[in-house]
Image (cartoon, rainbow, N blue to C red):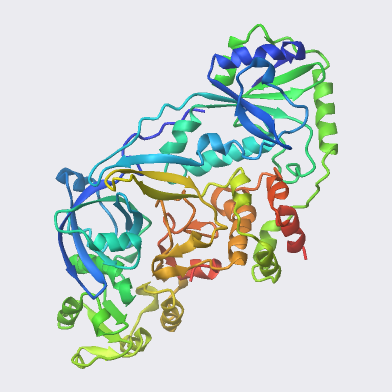
Amino acid sequence: MKYEYKKEPELYTPIMMRIISKRDLTSDVRFFQLVPTEEYKHLNLDYKPGQFMMLSLFGTGEAPFSISSSPARKGIFEFAIRKTGKITNKIFELKDGDQLGLRGPFGNGFPIERMLGKDIIIVAGGLGAAPLRSLLLYILDNRELFGRLIYLYGARNIDDMLYKPDFTEMLQSDQLELHLTVDKGNEGYENEIEEGLVTHLFKYVSDIDPKNTIACVCGPPVMYKSVVKEILKYNLEKDKILLNLERRMKCGTGKCGHCIIDYRYTCIDGPVFTYWDVIHMRELI
Amino acid sequence: MRALKLSKKDEIKLYDVLKEFGEVWAPVPKGSKYVYAKIERKEDLVIHEECILPIIPVKKFLMPPDFTMLKFTPSKYSIPEEDIPTTVVVGVPACDIHAVNILDKFYTTDYVDNYYMKRREKLIILGKSGTPGENCFCHKSNTNIVEEGYDLFFFDLGDYYLVWVGSEKGDDIVRKGADIFSEEVPKDVSKKFVEFRKNRNKSYTNNVDLEGVTDLMELNYDAPFWDEFGDKCLACGQCTMVCPTCTCFNVIDDLALSGETGERRRYWDSCMFKDYSLVAGQHNFRESKAERLKLWYTHKLKAFIGHFGSPSCVGCGRCIETCPVDINVVTVVEKLKG
């Protein structure tokens, strides 16, 4: 049997990146900015909001991370990474100038073509604000291509809120309708940040045109059911509710099997699924 | 497609012809079972009358159980040069060729996996139709007849083999062995061929009925028998290792003692293992054995249809032979039918 197969790019060989800056977003989430060590290579790396990359640390391993930067801002790749296991512990030890590998981008990402001209509701929970930042920045960078932009963000507490200075500043912006909340304890931020679950913020969401609106949700697994329930109250069609999900993966190319849900691979057919998918694949959320 | 004759008296000369093309591998006995092993002497190349299903199927040639993807230092990596020998594997039953066809589809859809393709190009498959074993049910999974995916395919018609040529490489082999492969096929070949197929179809003893299992998987999503199977399951993963269409793998980095250099290895994984669906923060999407078993059977009997148009169970019966606690396609289908 004879096949034509591409010699380049090799799917499983990472592009080497260099850390150019990093800062702590919370006590256990750090923000990293990366550029390719061979700078011409970034030209080959285009991506969509909602896609992810396999981050590779030789000697420790690989893991998938959502891209946090906007594809409209070329050349720099940003990630918000929570320290939670073997690989992320090692990543937290890295200094500016240190190298790591990136493979990808993988996954479907948000269907930007379908979202053009539409009103967009974004609902983020906890670390879900990391992948949704890519979408948020992309929409802000191309503001005239979209309708209303409503952004709801809930974190566990004040200290766990990602990009807090950015968000509190954005509250003044006329570019979006932004509402922030924490599950408990908003002391010192009473004017900017509510107290209560993210679902409480839907009281600010009104005059939704269900035919012309797309909702994008990302957060911890427990959040999806309650948030989707709120969104359904606006009579949005089920394929206009988009959920950005997380699964274990080892390849990103639909081969290693770990991210499979029924006949869909999270790395190929996701990580952005519609609520219609969720109804038909019971393991999804 | 054309068919030639190989007299059984010339069978002994087959090895020398195949050797011209690469390493020759065939099933050889090991304990009470068979394994694919490299054949070093022509008298060791035996074409068996019955279907031989080695414990580990053809996939072992195409995705080694464990191999090095790349070697690295902290800041650089290289892809090891591999010298993959051309391998002629002899005596592959129809079901296992169907499995290779499924693997071909799987590894070339969405993204092409070069590690697989490099090996696939070096594999020559000589298939053989034989008497089904007690666990075989390929007649029920529609994988008892093979139309593509082999280079040569043998039917035992008494004192000769009818050899179908299925590819260019297969054609090269019969040309190289022109003195043993004859264009002069006996006149009564059609009669004998029909007879062979008829007898073969009659000799199945495992008549598990797969009709409607796709829908039954859906209807039984919450059925209590999954928990019963889950309680029995040892999560040993043997079913996935012996399944000719199981492809899951894990990737890890192995550091040398110096702590500086090492290699990235890819090795067979199993969806029966507890950490298969474990993500960051210790959240496990498939904590229970019942959930993991259900995933496997969903993938074999239902999900693959959504992806590739046919189920990924080829009816080889290896899971029946292998599972120490009797969880297999037959016992699961029995429960599915209620």
* Residue A227 appears in the figure: yes
Q: Quadrant of the C terminus of chain B?
A: bottom right
Residue B25: x %, y % from top left: 60, 26
Q: Is residue A163 left or right of residue B54?
A: left
Residue B271: x %, y % from top left: 55, 56
Residue A187: x %, y % from top left: 22, 93
Q: Residue at x 44, y 45 (%)?
A: B266
Q: Quadrant of the N terminus of chain B?
A: top right
Between A14 and B150, the one nearer to me in the picture: A14
Residue farthest along the front direction in this orientation: B257
In the rendered view, tell whether residue B160 sits above or below residue A27.
above
Residue B120: x %, y % from top left: 50, 32
Q: Residue at x 70, y 28 (%)?
A: B128
Between A235 and B166, the one nearer to me in the picture: B166
In the rendered view, tell whether residue A97 sits above or below residue A38.
below
The quarter of the displayed image where residue B165 is located: top right
Q: Residue at x 46, y 48 (%)?
A: A255
The quarter of the displayed image where residue A164 is located: bottom left
Q: Residue at x 59, y 31 (%)?
A: B149
In the rendered view, tell whether residue B328 sits above or below residue A210.
above
Q: Is residue B225 left or right of residue A230?
A: right
Q: Is residue A136 left or right of residue B335?
A: left
Q: Is residue A110 left or right of residue B149?
A: left
Residue farthest along the top direction in this orientation: B179
* Residue A144 appears in the figure: no
